[in-house]
Image: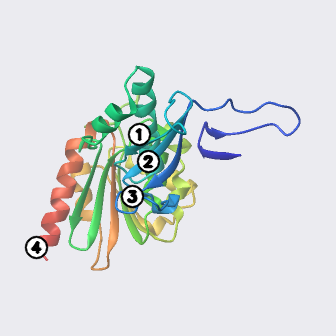
Amino acid sequence: DFIRYHHIGRAHCSNCSWQNGPADYELTLLKKEDAPESEIKADEMSAADRVVVSSRRWQTGNGEELFPFEGENMLDLYNSLAAITLYSELGYSPESIAGALAGVAIGKSRKEIVKIGPHTVYRMLAKGKNPIAVTRVLDALMKRPGDKYVVLLVDTSVKKMSSEDNVAWIFDADLDLLAADDVKQIVVAGMRSEDIRLALLFAGVDGDKIVSCRDKEESADLVRIGEKEATVAILYELYSESISRKVVKNLQQRWDGK
């Protein structure tokens, strides 16, 4: 019937009665506080600040409740729904859950959005050796309109390469998302940057768009953003979070020095 990503979706068999069981909790609508009668479309998700969740567990009214929403992509929706489901099952009322969600903010160690000149810089965690994590972040960012510049800090090797390093996982990520025409440049940094560059080439990415370096801290110097408004996406693995902050700082200094 539909697939959100990987194993998440809904299906049925046309030859027998098999199908997904009914959901105990289902997110049904996106809304905006200053336009409560209007439904926000999925491709305008970033404009939503409320979600409607229906559940057979709730006996009030038609079983629908309204909750605050902080996010802009499908991952954020599923995270919100998971939190609502968990605390409802633990016995918390919809009102208390909504109150708690109203004070929630996404941790900057996971996601941070910074404006540098006309550009929007997304600094997002994409766990190394986890192709699903990398794919989900890429998919969310590639849905943004306009030109995009991508910095990949997902290599998990540290100061030197070793025989224990294994970058086979990166070939399972949907790197073909980066073959889109609106992706203007990809900077790959890390000791195994050339291996990741190879995976990008296998995924159909134009080699002229790829720049690589082994020192992650130098990656900001390789980004060639111009005056035209664009999205700069910095994906970092868990232990490169501090380096990703330095990259943003260096980009800001470069822009200020123009």
Q: Which residue bears the numbered disc 2?
A: 51
Query: Disc 2 to disc 4, how far (Cα)?
Result: 43 Å
Identified by mark 4, the residue type is Gly
Query: In the image, residue 229 lies at what x, y percent?
Result: 32, 75
Q: Are marks 2 and 3 in contact (CB under 8 Å)?
A: no
Query: In the image, residue 127 lies at what x, y percent?
Result: 38, 38
Q: Which residue bears the numbered disc 3?
A: 32
Q: Nearer the viewer, mark 4 or mark 3?
A: 3
Identify which residue, 133 or 194, lies in the foreground.
Answer: 133
Q: Residue farthest to the right?
A: 15
Mark 2 lies on a secondary structure that is: strand
Q: Is residue 108 left or right of residue 181?
A: left
Query: Disc 1 to disc 2, how far (Cα)?
Result: 9 Å
Query: Disc 1 to disc 3, how far (Cα)?
Result: 16 Å
Q: Residue at x 43, y 64 (%)?
A: 144
Find residue 257 and name its label.
4
Query: Disc 4 to disc 3, how far (Cα)?
Result: 39 Å
Q: Which residue bears the numbered disc 1?
A: 80
Q: Residue at x 79, y 30 (%)?
A: 18
